[in-house]
Image (cartoon, coloured by chain):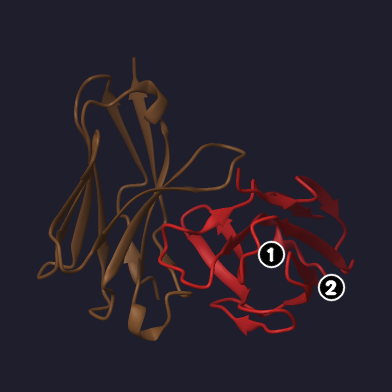
Chain colours: A brown, B red
Amino acid sequence: DQQVKQNSPSLSVQEGRISILNCDYTNSMFDYFLWYKKYPAEGPTFLISISSIKDKNEDGRFTVFLNKSAKHLSLHIVPSQPGDSAVYFCAASARETGANNLFFGTGTRLTVIP
Amino acid sequence: DVKVTQSSRYLVKRTGEKVFLECVQDMDHENMFWYRQDPGLGLRLIYFSYDVKMKEKGDIPEGYSVSREKKERFSLILESASTNQTSMYLCASSPQGFSGNTIYFGEGSWLTVV
């Protein structure tokens, strides 16, 4: 059973516009959420994270929003650049049950059109 | 610069063969992981190890085993490869105080079982 879901397998956005990637989770024990970026033929790399005590975390062009009541998080990229084209995975963990257990979503392939 | 190295990038094996996927990290990390990535399923944890000679099953351990004889090396073993094990395999490592943003992935090993 998929505890972390990314319902959009792909997203295309014009360069300079906003990209919004969405992620839903089912386990209320999750208290730490992350986004990873993956280029073809490379391993995922950490992008940004958010703890459940916050509802927003910002790092440059990347902002993650967390809505705990809706069990939903989103990643905003503003402005989008062609180099942002990659697959984005959201992930969640419950520190209480051991942070070794990261649950990943299915990924969203973002294409930024020049 | 941190490095997780997977020895084989692309392999083609026959059904029934024994397959070894090797992973080495140079960061003195306690934790090491093996994931597989499949379209529509995201990253799924096969096994992880938090210390030498220690291992824990992940979400999909069936058909796999692991070996960690040295801290820097974590091997994934397919005892008798089957076609449904055709996938991309990702090794990762993290320090003991893992918080998700300190997990480092290798570049992946593409395994095709024919």
Q: Same chain for marks 1 and 2?
A: yes
- Chain hosting mark 2: B
Q: Residue at x 32, y 55 (%)?
A: A6
- Chain hosting mark 1: B
Percent across and percent down for residue B31 are 59, 71
**Mark 1 or mark 2: which is in front?**
2
In front: B7, or B77?
B7
The residue that label 1 is drawn on is B84
User: Does A85 sit above or below residue B12?
Assistant: above
Answer with the quarter of the image where residue B32 lies: bottom right
In front: A108, or A69?
A69
Q: Which mark is residue B23?
A: none
User: Does B3 sit above or below residue B17?
Assistant: above
The residue that label 2 is drawn on is B80
Q: Quarter of the image for the C terminus of chain B: give it.
A: bottom right
Answer with the quarter of the image where residue A93 lies: bottom left
